[in-house]
Image (cartoon, helix red, strand yellow):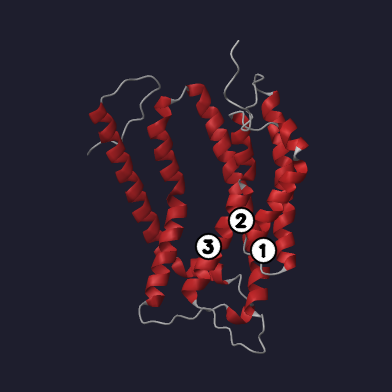
Amino acid sequence: MRRLPRRLPHGEEATFVEHLEELRWRIIIVLGALALTTIVAFAFHGHVLDWLNHALPADRRQPVTLGVAEPFTVSLTVSVYAGFLLALPVILWQLWSFLAPAFDPSIERRVLGLVAFATALGVTGLAFGYWILLPRALHWLTNYDDKHFTNLVQAKPYYAFTATMLLGIVIVFELPMVVLGLVSIGVLSSARLRKNRRVGYFIVAVVALGLPGPDPVTTALELLPMWALFEGSIWLAALVEHRRPETRVIDPFEAVVQPPD
């Protein structure tokens, strides 16, 4: 039986063929994990569908399908997405194991800490979107002009809408990671963020208006945590600056051509 790909230590040299062989086996592991998790998700896809349908109003929790094969194709598609989420830790670990030899071992601890922080932000955003935003948005949409329309919730568009809305909320909750990255490379600083706080709040409000929020209350529910995340990003930026050596902040509008001496 062939051994799993070995993770190369930092600084160890390997030939191009050895790197290709390692990459091939890591891809095989990723594909195997995706196949296994998709099979598991399909075996329990009824529970997954019930979980997704629970956000709908009580009298509309059984979406309509309009084709002979649509119940199967929709269930399979949902299972593939669920399988991808289940296999995501394996995918990220294989990716990091392949790239880690290029980084100093002292950086690995920071990277793992950032991954844990990003995961916590993503899970928080997913919970906030599923339990607070999604039910309210669906209730408003499915009851809009109900005196003039009979709203039949079709399965495929509903799951696409749900996935898009939850993914958007998760991405928004990763705002502190984006700010930390820009601070780490010197593009932003906590002082600049404080100075342009009003501009930042305005940009966040524009982003909130672009998210799926059909009524003002839902939009406000999206906007408040986004403002809180932006404010928290300023404090995180100050903490990062305090714990690393002082570096010059890059001004993207600064002229790069210097006058001759």
Secondary structure state at the residue bearing disc 3: helix
**Image spot of residue 211 (x, y percent):** 62, 60
Q: Amino acid at mark 3?
A: Ala
Tell whether label 1 touches label 2 (CB within 8 Å).
yes
Tell whether label 3 touches label 2 (CB within 8 Å).
no
**Image spot of residue 166 (x, y percent):** 58, 59
Left or right of 149: which side holds 200?
Answer: right
| Residue with the mark numbered 2 | 169
From the viewer's perspective, is residue 18 above or below residue 125?
above
CA–CA distance in space, label 2 to label 3: 10 Å
Q: Say few, some or many: other residues with alpha carbon within 10 Å of mark 3 (under 14 / 14 to 19 / 20 or more).
A: some
Q: Residue furthest front?
A: 260
Q: Amino acid at mark 2?
A: Ile
Q: Amino acid at mark 1?
A: Leu
Which numbered disc, 2 or 1, marks the residue that appears first in the sequence?
1
Quadrant housing the N terminus: top left
Q: Residue furthest top?
A: 261
CA–CA distance in space, label 1 to label 3: 13 Å
| Residue with the mark numbered 1 | 133
| Residue with the mark numbered 3 | 163
Left or right of 245: which side holds 199?
Answer: right
CA–CA distance in space, label 2 to label 1: 9 Å
* Residue visible at 77% across and 36% down in the picture: 195
**Image spot of residue 190 (x, y percent):** 72, 32
Tell whether label 3 touches label 1 (CB within 8 Å).
no
* Residue visible at 68% across and 63% down in the picture: 132
